[in-house]
Amino acid sequence: MSFVLYTVTDKIAYITLNRAEKRNALSPELVTELKEAFSKAEQDTLVKAIVLKANGESFCAGADLEYLQQLQNFSFEENLADSNHLKELFLKIYTLKKVVIAQVQGHALAGGCGLATVCDFTFSVPEAKFGYTEVRIGFIPALVSVFLIRKIGEQKARHLLLTGEIIKADTALAYGMITEVVPAGELENRVNQFARVLIAQNSTQSMQLTKQLIHEVQNLSLIEALNLTANQNAKARATDDCKKGIASFLNKQEIKW
């Protein structure tokens, strides 16, 4: 059985966690299949946007606790390799050339909350709960801290990471962790509608370059960031999408991406 399902419909790739009996817990095999699925979607020229969703009641319960027990017998080098495996998945999603939308139909906890955090947009049902609960089991929210602090700032991230508090979807929305709270019966349609608007209205190439800027400028000084963005601005003007977009605008023609 595949731990991850992959389908493409109308330029949208759907990557589905398919380990419902384990609340879609992050085993090494599941992480491997996710990395492969995101690479496939990134390279697929027919795909313009990606939706990450899950089967079952939970979106993702975080690390597989049975596997965590096994890790206690691993050497430091083996544990580092395992940690790097998840790190590569989070980094891949965060820096992916295409927009990634999380469709959260159930609880997203610990590493599962991290999975939602690294997506560009996150839509959730009101009943879903979020939390970085690692400190409650003697573990640490190491990898996700890098992305969460960037996303919502140190003060709010400090509270969530140090308390391990589990919060409701509306609180996650207020914190800036997620994009929108949608009734369960409307979640799938709302996510699809949002993805279709991005595909229809925006240049895929422009979204790719903008994503790249977002994660690069945060590591630079003010002058370095401005130099980088000026350079990227100049490069963007020479792209086919920019030429097409400006020509369509000037000729008062509808832009079809």
Image (tube, rainbow, N blue to C red):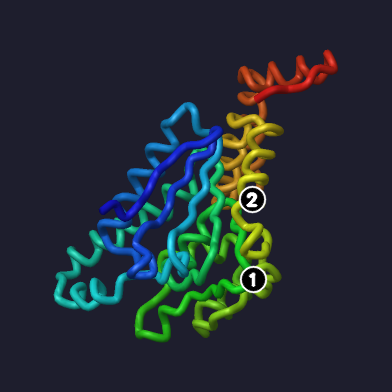
Q: Quadrant of residue 236?
A: top right
Task: Name the residue located 16 percent from the left edge and 71 percent from the top edge.
Answer: 74
Q: Position of residue 175 (x, y in %)?
A: 66, 70
Provide the residue designation for mark 1: 126
Q: Position of residue 92 (x, y in %)?
A: 42, 47
The answer to whether residue 166 is left or right of residue 173 is left
The answer to whether residue 95 is left or right of residue 77 is right
User: On screen, 45 above or below 51?
Assistant: above
Q: Secondary structure at mark 2?
A: helix
Task: Name the residue located 40 percent from the left edge and 44 percent from the top edge.
Answer: 6
Task: Name the residue located 24 percent from the left edge and 75 percent from the top edge.
Answer: 66
| Label 2 vs 1, first from the N-terminus | 1
Look at the image and tell me in which quarter the C terminus lies. Answer: top right
User: On screen, 144 above or below 188?
Assistant: below
Provide the residue designation for mark 2: 189
Q: Position of residue 105 (x, y in %)?
A: 54, 64
Between 256 and 89, the one lying in front of the other is 256
User: On screen, 223 above or below 175?
Assistant: above
Q: Amino acid at mark 2?
A: Asn
Q: Secondary structure at mark 1?
A: loop
Q: Position of residue 216 (x, y in %)?
A: 55, 45
